Amino acid sequence: MLYKVAKSLVSVILFPLYRIKVIGKDNIPKNGPVLICSNHISNFDPPVVGITSPRDIYFMAKGELFEKPFLGRLLKGIHAFPVKRGLADRNALRMGLQILKEGNTLGLFPEGTRSKTGEIGNALAGAGFFALRSKADIVPCAIVGPYKKFQRLTVIYGKPINIQEYRSKKASAQEVADLIMDEIKKLKENYQNQTTLLDK
């Protein structure tokens, strides 16, 4: 209940503020486990992905935020769960896998931290871990900014990534994470190229 209320309120604020345009929303499967992987350019990325996805999304959040009683309850109510940054947090990994096992949607930012330049960086292995250890559909997402008031912010969802070949050859989590990041880059570059052509 809290998730739906929060999503409605945040949508009313952010959609007009950043003139959010959503492309490819139908690429997100309606049923079954889904792993949405996006580039990371702002603290607003989680709510923006949350309000543009037709499915409820679970996100990881810094563990220290949950130490404050009110904020901790609020975060849990909007489907966030704690992760210890800078560590291989086994509890967070188990929680993420359980979310997918139950047929829900997990949102990840493979870079692990925000890009200060807006350019897409390298992926950490975490996204590959969840992709390989679950049966989730992996949906790449590109957020094309910048976040400036009343300027267009575009959120692009790509088609699910087929990693069967990587599973067959027993690829590493890092290899799969790199593949996911490459797909996110392609989404952004293709959109920017199309926009440039239209502007000419």
Image (cartoon, rainbow, N blue to C red):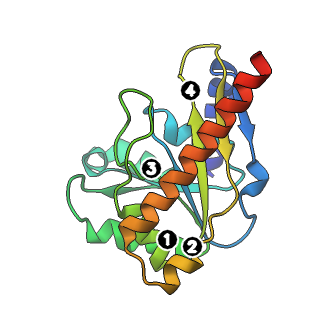
Alpha-carbon span between mark 2 and mark 4: 28 Å
The front one of 143 and 8 is 143
The front one of 98 and 4 is 98
Q: Amino acid at mark 1?
A: Ala
Alpha-carbon span between mark 2 and mark 3: 18 Å
Mark 2 or 4: in front is 2
Tell me if label 1 and label 3 are in contact, CB under 8 Å: no
The residue singled out by tag 1 in the image is 131
Tell me if label 2 and label 1 are in contact, CB under 8 Å: yes
The residue singled out by tag 2 in the image is 163
Identify the residue at horizontal 76%, vertical 16% (top origin). Answer: 199
Picture disc at residue 109: 3
Sequence-first disc among 1 and 3: 3
Left or right: residue 38 versus residue 162 is: left
Q: Residue 30, image x and y in percent?
A: 75, 64
Element under label 1?
helix
Image quadrant in which the C terminus is located:
top right
Element under label 2?
loop
Alpha-carbon span between mark 4 and mark 3: 16 Å
Sequence-first disc among 4 and 3: 3
Element under label 3?
loop
**Can residue 2 be seen?**
no
Picture disc at residue 145: 4
**Can residue 58 be seen?**
yes
Tell me if label 2 and label 3 are in contact, CB under 8 Å: no
